[in-house]
Image (cartoon, grey):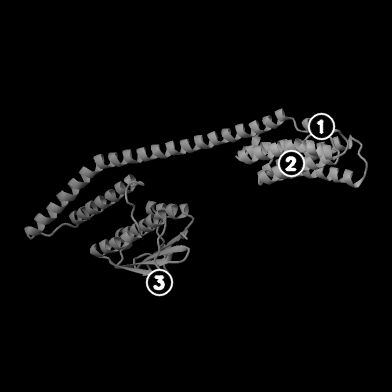
C-alpha cells in the first residue's frame, strides 16, 4: 500500500501537536489544585493559549516564540509550577525557520524574567523562586531544542542544495546531448543535402542554358533541396541555441515576413498596441510560432497571401497568422510535428494556441502568450 495514504497534512499535524501540548499543560496545571480565583483562571488560560499558539508556528515562528514566552512568564507569575514545554517547541520552530538571533535573544530574556515571575507570585522566597524557574525551563532542554531546530534547518538546506545540483547536472547533460545531436546532424546530413542542392541547381541551369525543357521532377528535387537546407539550418540553430547566444526575438519577425515574400508568397506584417519589452522566452516562442506558421504555409497551404498580426496588450502578446490556402473546415489537415511543437512551446509559458481552418477558406494560427510586465 502507498505510504502517502497515511501521511498527515502539515496543518493538521501542527494542530494535533498544539492541542496535545495544551492538554498536557492544563493537566499539569490542574494537578497543582489551584483555587478557582481570577488569578488561577488566568493561569489556566495562559497554559491553554501557550499550547494552542504552536499551531501557527510554521507560519509565524517569531510571533509564536514571543507568545509562548509571555505565557510561560504569565502562568509562573500566577503561581503555576509548570514546565515551559510550549516555549521549547517554539524555540525549535524558530531555529528551524532560521531566526537564530531573535530566538537566542528571546530565550535569554525568558530565562532572566522567569525567576522574577516566580517571585512575583508571592508563593516562594528568592531561593525557591530561582529553583522553580530553573525547573520550569532547564537550560539543557532549551539548548537541545535550539540545536535540534538548527540541525534540521541545515539538513533541509543541504537537501535543497543537492536538488539544485541535480537539476543543474541534468540541464548540463541535456545541453551536451543537444550539441552532440547537432554535430551528428551536421556531419551526416549537411554534406549530402548540399550535394543534392548543388547538383540539382546545376542541372536546371544547364538545361535552361541549352534551351531544353526542365523536367518537373528536377524542379521538385531542386526545391526540396533548398527547403531541406533551410530546415536543417533552422534545426541546427535551435539545437545549438542556449543562453550564451542571442535568441531570436520579436524584432526578427520582420525578417521572416520579408523572406517569405521573396519566396513568392505575398506576406504582410501588422503590429498593434504600444510596443513594450517582453521576456526572452515569450519573444523566442513568438518568433518560432511565426516561423513555423510561415513555413507550413509555404510548404503545404498552396496559398498566395499570408498575414502576420501582432498585438501588444497590457498583459498578453497576441499573435495571429492567416493564409488564403486550400484548407477548409471540411478538410482539416492532420496536425504535424511543427504544430505540436508550437503548442508545446505556448503551453509551457501558460499561453493558449488555436490552429484551425477558417470558415472563409485558408488556415489560421492564433497564440496568446502571457506577459509579466516589469514595473
**How many angstroms separate mark 3 from mark 1 (CA)?**
89 Å
Residue that sits furthest to the bottom in the current view:
360
Specify the quadrant of the image occupied by residue 368: bottom left
Residue 361 versus residue 240 in the image, above or below: below
**Quadrant that contains the N terminus:** top right
**Disc 2 and disc 1 in contact, CB within 8 angstroms:** no
The answer to whether one can see residue 339 in this image is no
In-front residue for pair 367/374: 374
Answer with mark 2 or mark 3, whichever residue precedes in sequence.
2
Other residues around mark 2 within 10 Å, as few (<14) / some (14–19) / many (≥20): many
Q: Nearer the viewer, mark 2 or mark 3?
A: 2
Q: Position of residue 50 (x, y in %)?
A: 77, 42
Answer with mark 2 or mark 1, whichever residue precedes in sequence.
2
Residue ID at (41%, 59%): 278
Answer with mark 3 or mark 1, whichever residue precedes in sequence.
1
**How many angstroms separate mark 2 from mark 3 (CA)?**
75 Å
Question: What residue is pinned by disc 3?
Answer: 360
Q: Position of residue 228 (x, y in %)?
A: 26, 50
In-front residue for pair 153/198: 153
Q: Secondary structure at mark 1?
A: helix
In-front residue for pair 338/281: 281
Question: What residue is pinned by disc 2?
Answer: 69
Residue ID at (91%, 39%): 34
Specify the quadrant of the image occupied by residue 13: top right
Other residues around mark 3 within 10 Å, as few (<14) / some (14–19) / many (≥20): few
Amino acid at each position: 500500500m502507498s505510504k502517502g495514504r497515511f501521511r498527515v497534512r502539515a496543518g493538521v499535524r501542527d494542530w494535533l501537536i498544539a492541542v496535545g501540548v495544551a492538554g498536557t499543560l492544563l493537566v499539569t496545571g490542574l494537578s497543582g489544585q489551584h483555587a478557582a480565583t481570577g488569578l488561577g483562571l488566568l493561569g489556566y488560560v495562559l497554559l491553554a493559549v501557550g499550547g494552542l499558539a504552536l499551531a501557527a508556528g510554521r507560519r509565524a515562528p517569531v510571533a509564536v516564540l514571543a507568545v509562548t514566552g509571555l505565557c510561560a512568564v504569565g502562568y509562573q507569575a500566577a503561581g503555576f509550577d509548570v514546565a515551559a514545554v510550549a516555549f521549547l517547541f517554539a524555540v525549535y520552530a524558530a531555529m528551524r525557520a532560521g531566526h537564530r538571533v531573535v530566538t537566542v535573544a528571546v530565550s535569554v530574556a525568558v530565562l532572566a524574567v522567569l525567576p522574577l515571575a516566580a517571585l512575583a507570585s508571592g508563593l516562594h522566597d528568592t531561593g525557591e523562586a530561582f529553583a522553580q524557574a530553573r525547573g520550569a525551563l532547564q537550560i539543557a532542554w532549551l539548548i537541545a531544542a535550539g540545536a535540534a531546530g538548527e540541525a534540521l534547518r541545515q539538513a533541509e538546506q543541504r537537501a535543497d542544495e543537492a536538488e539544485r545540483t541535480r537539476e543543474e547536472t541534468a540541464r548540463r547533460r541535456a545541453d551536451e546531448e543537444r550539441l552532440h545531436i547537432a554535430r551528428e546532424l551536421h556531419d551526416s546530413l549537411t554534406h549530402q543535402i548540399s550535394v543534392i542542392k548543388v547538383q540539382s541547381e546545376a542541372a536546371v541551369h544547364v538545361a535552361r542554358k541549352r534551351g531544353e525543357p526542365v523536367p518537373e521532377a528536377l524542379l521538385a528535387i531542386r526545391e526540396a533541396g533548398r527547403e531541406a537546407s533551410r530546415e536543417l539550418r533552422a534545426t541546427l540553430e535551435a539545437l545549438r541555441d542556449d543562453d550564451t547566444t542571442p535568441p531570436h526575438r520579436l524584432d526578427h519577425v520582420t525578417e521572416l515576413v520579408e523572406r517569405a515574400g521573396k519566396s513568392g508568397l505575398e506576406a504582410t506584417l501588422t503590429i498593434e498596441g504600444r510596443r513594450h519589452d517582453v521576456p526572452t522566452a515569450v519573444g523566442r516562442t513568438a518568433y518560432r510560432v511565426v516561423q513555423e506558421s510561415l513555413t507550413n504555409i509555404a510548404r503545404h497551404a498552396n496559398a498566395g497571401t499570408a498575414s502576420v498580426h501582432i498585438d501588444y496588450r497590457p498583459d498578453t502578446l497576441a499573435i495571429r497568422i492567416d493564409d488564403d490556402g486550400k484548407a477548409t473546415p471540411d478538410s482539416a489537415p492532420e496536425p504535424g510535428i511543427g504544430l505540436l511543437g508550437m503548442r508545446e512551446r505556448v503551453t509551457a509559458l501558460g499561453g493558449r494556441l488555436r490552429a484551425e481552418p477558417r470558415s472563409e477558406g485558408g488556415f489560421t494560427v492564433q497564440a496568446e502568450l502571457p506577459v509579466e510586465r516589469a514595473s
